[in-house]
C-alpha cells in the first residue's frame, strides 16, 4: 500500500513493487487498486491481482486481509495487530521441564501375619477422674432503667 493524499485525508494505492524497493519510493511496477479509509471502500483490479499472485507476488498482511474480505483470493485473514503485553505481571522464568516419572511397580500381596492375642488390662488401672469445669456466671441482662 502506498499512501497518497493530503494531511489527515489519507488515500492508498495498492501497488505491485519490487522486493528491493519500498512502496514509498514511488517506483512501482503496477497500480492494481486504491483504498479510501474514510469511506472504507477498496477499488481492486481482481484480474491483475490474481495474475501477480500467480507469478509469485506476495501481498502484505493488510492487503491480504483486504483481498480475502473482498473475495478476490480464498483463505483466512491474518492477525496484523501487535501482541498484547501484560505490563502488570512480572516476568517469571519457567522451571526446566523434568522427565516424566514412571509409575512404581505393583507391590506383591502382603504375607499373612499371625494374629496377636490381646492382653487383658488389669482392673486396678483406671482413667483419672475428670475435674469439673468451673461454673459459668450468666451475663447480666440490661434492665429497663438502664435503657431509658
Image (spheres, grey):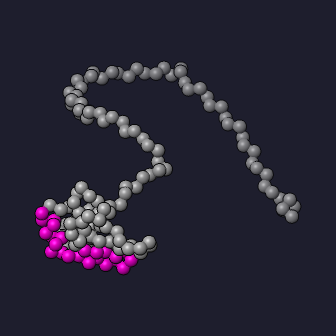
Q: Where is residue 55 in the image (x, y as percent from the top left)?
A: 12, 63
- Magenta segment boundaries in residue numbering: 33-55
* Picture quadrant where residue 70 is located: bottom left
* Picture quadrant where residue 42 is located: bottom left
The vertical placement of 9 against 135, above or below, is below
Whether residue 132 is in magenta: the answer is: no
Tell me the residue at 43%/21% (across/down). 120
Tell me the residue at 36%/36% (across/down). 95
Residue 122 shows in the view: yes
* Picture quadrant where residue 103 is located: top left
Q: Where is residue 20 in the image (x, y as percent from the top left)?
A: 24, 55
The vertical placement of 59 against 118, above or below, is below
Quadrant in the picture for the C terminus: bottom right
Residue 76 shows in the view: no
The vertical placement of 89 against 33, above or below, is above
Residue nearer the viewer, 57 or 94: 57
Amino acid at each position: 500500500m502506498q499512501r497518497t493524499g493530503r494531511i489527515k485525508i489519507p488515500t492508498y494505492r495498492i501497488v505491485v513493487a519490487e522486493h528491493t524497493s519500498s512502496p514509498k519510493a514511488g517506483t512501482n511496477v503496477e497500480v492494481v487498486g486504491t483504498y479510501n479509509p474514510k469511506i472504507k471502500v477498496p477499488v481492486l483490479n481482481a484480474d491483475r491481482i490474481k495474475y501477480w499472485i500467480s507469478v509469485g507476488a506476495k501481498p502484505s498482511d493488510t492487503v491480504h486481509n483486504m483481498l480475502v474480505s473482498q473475495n478476490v483470493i480464498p483463505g483466512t485473514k491474518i492477525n496484523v495487530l501487535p501482541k498484547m503485553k501484560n505490563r502488570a505481571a512480572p516476568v517469571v522464568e519457567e522451571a526446566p521441564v523434568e522427565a516424566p516419572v514412571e509409575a512404581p511397580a505393583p507391590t506383591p500381596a502382603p504375607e499373612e501375619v499371625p494374629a496377636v492375642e490381646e492382653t487383658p488390662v488389669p482392673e486396678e488401672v483406671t482413667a483419672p477422674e475428670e475435674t469439673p469445669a468451673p461454673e459459668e456466671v450468666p451475663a447480666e441482662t440490661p434492665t429497663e432503667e438502664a435503657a431509658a
